[in-house]
Each structure stands twice: as structure tokens, then as C-alpha cells.
Image: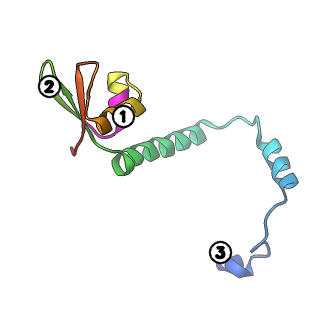
Amino acid sequence: MRGKYTGEKNPFYGKTHPDETKLRMRAAKLGLPLTQAHKEKLKAITTFNKEYNVRTKGMPVIVINVLSKEITHYPSLREAGKALTIDKKTISKYIKNQKVYLQLYLFKIGHQ
């Protein structure tokens, strides 16, 4: 049965639902409680996507504390921002300008 309706053999192939139908389908699903299994599946998917994005799309950051000379590596701007409670845009700006943030942190692009 699987191959019977694949591709051009599918009667709905190349067609799309009208906006009105999409709204009705959305309204029918809206407010329905999700099962615990479904919630866990969604959580696993979003967790995986976040971790994947940090590994593949994140820009590694090296943070140097100029007072203590401590060097910390972060996998992304977002992770560095969370750890230091600084907005990622601020970190990005200080990386570009190569200036010390609050006379405490120096940010550099780096690898782990």
C-alpha cells in the first residue's frame, strides 16, 4: 500500500489545502491536550535541535577575565551570554571592536 500512492500517484499530489481549510484543521486541533508521550517526544526533538544548533551553527567564544587571567571557552555566543548574564549582541559587539567589557571581560572568537 505504501508505494501505491507515492509521488504523482497520490491524488493530492501537487495540490494544497485552501487557507479556510487550514484554519478549520487548526481550530479542530487547538486546545486538545497532548499525551505525556507526545510531550516527551516534542521535548526530545527540541532539545536535540538546540544542541545540534549550538554544535553546528554556534560561534565558539573565548572569555578572558582580565583581572584574574582566567580563560573560559563557550560553544556559542548564547551560552557565553547565559553564563555571564550578558546579551549575545553585546558580546558580538565587543568581539568586533576588540575592547574590554566593563574593564573585566575580553571576548575572542575561538575553538574548543
Q: Which mark is residue 42?
A: none
Q: Give the mark, 1 or 2, whose residue is nearer the N terminus.
A: 2
Give the quadrant of the N terminus.
bottom right
Question: Which residue is disc 2 drawn over?
Answer: 70
Task: Please tell me which residue is depicted at 85% across the width and 48% down the height of the picture.
Answer: 24
Q: Amino acid at mark 3?
A: Arg
Residue 31 at what x, y percent from top left? 76, 34
Q: Are marks 1 and 2 in contact (CB under 8 Å)?
A: no
Q: Judge from the rendering whether residue 46 lies leftward or rightward of residue 71; answer left or right.
A: right
In this rendering, the answer to whether 106 lies above or below 10 is above
Front of the two marks 2 and 3 = 2
Q: Which mark is residue 2?
A: 3
Task: Please tell me which residue is depicted at 21% across the width and 44% down the height of the picture.
Answer: 112
- 77 inside magenta stretch: yes
Badge 2 density bin: few <14, some 14–19, many ≥20, Cα 10 Å: few
The answer to which quarter of the image holds residue 110 is top left
Where does the magenta region start and end? 74-81
SS assignment for the magenta stretch, majority: helix
Task: Please tell me which residue is depicted at 83% across the width and 48% down the height of the picture.
Answer: 23
Residue 33 at what x, y percent from top left? 71, 34
Label 1 and label 3: CA atoms lie apart by 53 Å
Badge 1 density bin: few <14, some 14–19, many ≥20, Cα 10 Å: few
Q: Amino acid at mark 2?
A: Glu
Question: Which residue is disc 1 drawn over?
Answer: 93
- 25 inside magenta stretch: no
